[in-house]
Image (cartoon, rainbow, N blue to C red):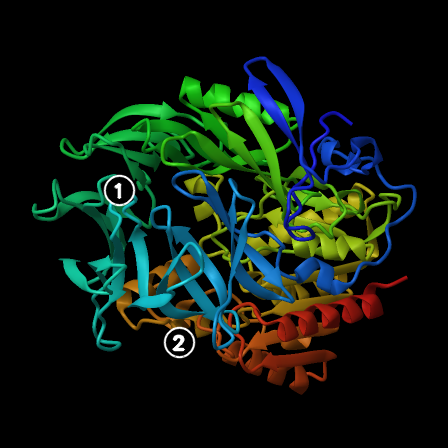
Amino acid sequence: MRYPILFYDLAANFGFRQGVSGVLIPGQVVFRCVASPNSVNLSSLHLLWLFVAAALPLAAAPPPQLPVEDFFRPPACGQAQLSPDGTKVAFESAEAWEKRLAIYDLRTGKLTRMRFDRNYELSSFFWKGNDQIILFLEQDGYWTGEIYAAAADGSGMQPVGDHSRIINRLPDDPHHILVAESERSGPSDMRGPSVRLLNVETSRSSPVQSALEHVLSWVTDQDGVVRLGLRADPDGVTWLHRRDKDGPLSVLWKEKLAGGETFNPLEFDFDGRTLYVASNRNRSFDALWAFDVEKKEFVREVFVPPGVDVEGVVMSRRHRRLMAVEYTGDRSHIEPLDPEYARLRKSTQEALGNRPMSFRNHDKEWHKALVRVGGDRDPGEYYVLDIDKGELNAFHRVMPWIKPEQMAEMRPIEFKARDGLLIHGYLSLPVGREPRNLPLILHPHGGPQARDHWGFNEEVQFLCNRGFAVLQVNFRGSTGYGQKFEKAGFGEWGGKMQDDLTDAVKWTIAEGYADPKRVGIYGASYGGYATMIVLCLTPELYRCGINYVGVTDPKLLLKHARHSEEVVKAQIRRLLGGATDAELIKAPSAVALADHIQAPVLMYYGIHDPRVDIENGDVMAAALSRAHKTYEYKTKTLEGHGFQSKQAKLEFYNAMDAFLAKYLGE
């Protein structure tokens, strides 16, 4: 037991029991006890799980089979933010699956809970000043489209906007936010969103930027001025730029889908002229560059990550400078670029036993910070850091019912695909079982222009708790590994992308981890397509498959594109490998190949899915029926692309539980 820190466990006891704070001194960490009137003896507390290093020892025996609900219920403390003056923490707090907003006063210990009418629940929120919060609510798991404002004591909640997306919170303006609003009149209207200045007290708004054809999004500088617009072209994208709020827009950079230098704006510097850009200039992956928007040229290379793409930057309004850069290799990394920030991060991480951590946000003057720690086996917990005093106080666990020692380790892996391409991924093995000849679930990610990450994953932990090894693969076409790797997936749906998955399974079997006679696959969205197509192309490898809201015929992506403009369809064709007509798309259809499937299939779809139309499920079920295959097909009336309600979620995961036990069990 390295550091005796006790949580102020608000989920169980909304008063301070006892706290321990850490005095952060560069190169040294000293802890002192801060007791409350109802403090308890530290020696009587079973807190060892808090201070275990990232790799916990295997349990002597497999842990008990935990209820499905334990993995998929909302967290006790989800999103959390420190107020600008550092006196309060607002956080998402669930009661009986209902997500509410709670506000905890760090000075008085008072807890305030907001309750919402009409079965509304919290979706997201942010502070607007010290005494007001902007909220987004959801109903049945989906955003209502309205923006609300409320006082920090829970009073006076009222709608202030409708069907808008926040593009700048304007932290220095106590009355306004910038929002993007769609003004499209119908499918033939090619305009993107406009930008308006919304008064969160009066609900009145005024125009800032009009909507333009094919301009999909807008980017502001540190002063909240709209400076960049992203225009979609049939052959790529164009970044438009204006010098100041009254200046005209002109072309800043054009990027072709076919390749060339990438240009991904991350943040403006505080000088208004320097734009921090992720670009593969002179490299095969995105490094961090400083770009002069007036000269329209790259100025200097700021940071080069180790062979992967830069993902983001950390800026400080208090210090008015760049503080750190973010990238993901096997794990997520935050690389300090500012010496002061580096010392603060190093001292905080040492105080937390060098566990993975991040600063969620700081108060306006950087006197305090909200810190989150966690890992692959631990959903995490929050701490409040007093930077001036060097004190670190435990605040709240994210999922206090989860015991990290019962969770599985997520191990980074790499292997060579059949054509020699290096592929990365993760292998999670069930706790307390010999890591040999285990039943295996291949779990391909969605997107496909996305990637799997290291960290606590509810689905992975659920499957490992049931005794399965879980294999996640960042196959070619995944993001984060450079443009060449991503574009290697273009035109390879049902081709080399699926070969990578097959090679991953065979690698796992060859290494002795997996029983070749007990391999299943489960994927959602694009992962659902990968599931169905590998069952068609390599039926001998799999005993069963689960398709959750997955594409089954790529041609349906074109048919049901949300906008009919040629720009969107051209990009879909490029991704799938087609030319100018849907008939030329080369990606194989699982519907057409249904007679090749040998394994039982479980399929779940949401009828109101805006991304993967329900037709994908209907035609697949019909094809399986015609081919006399074993399958189960369920649809949920009120659900979309991923189920949100308690009833639908639990039904799906319980069905998965029973399905896998039936076809992959001992």
Q: What's the mark number on residue 559?
A: 2
**Residue that appears at 7% across and 45% down:** 247
View extreme (top): residue: 27
Density class for disc 2 (Cα within 10 Å; few <14, some 14-19, many ≥20) is few
Residue type highlighted by circle 1? Asp
> 235 or 550: nearer the eye?
550
Q: The C terminus is located in which quarter?
A: bottom right
Q: Is residue 415 above or below residue 23?
A: below
Asked if residue 592 shows in the view, the reply is: no
> 304 or 646: nearer the eye?
646
Write down the residue under mark 1: 172
Q: Position of residue 148 (x, y in %)?
A: 36, 64
Relative side of 151 to 544, left or right:
left
Q: Quadrant of residue 184?
A: bottom left
Asked if residue 146 shows in the view, the reply is: yes
Q: The N terminus is located in which quarter?
A: top right
Q: Quadrant of residue 415?
A: top right
Q: Is residue 338 above or below residue 284?
A: above
Q: Position of residue 509 (x, y in %)?
A: 79, 47
Alpha carbons under labels 2 and 1: distance apart: 45 Å
Residue type highlighted by circle 2? Lys
Relative side of 101 to 378, left or right:
left
Badge 1 marks a residue whose secondary structure is loop
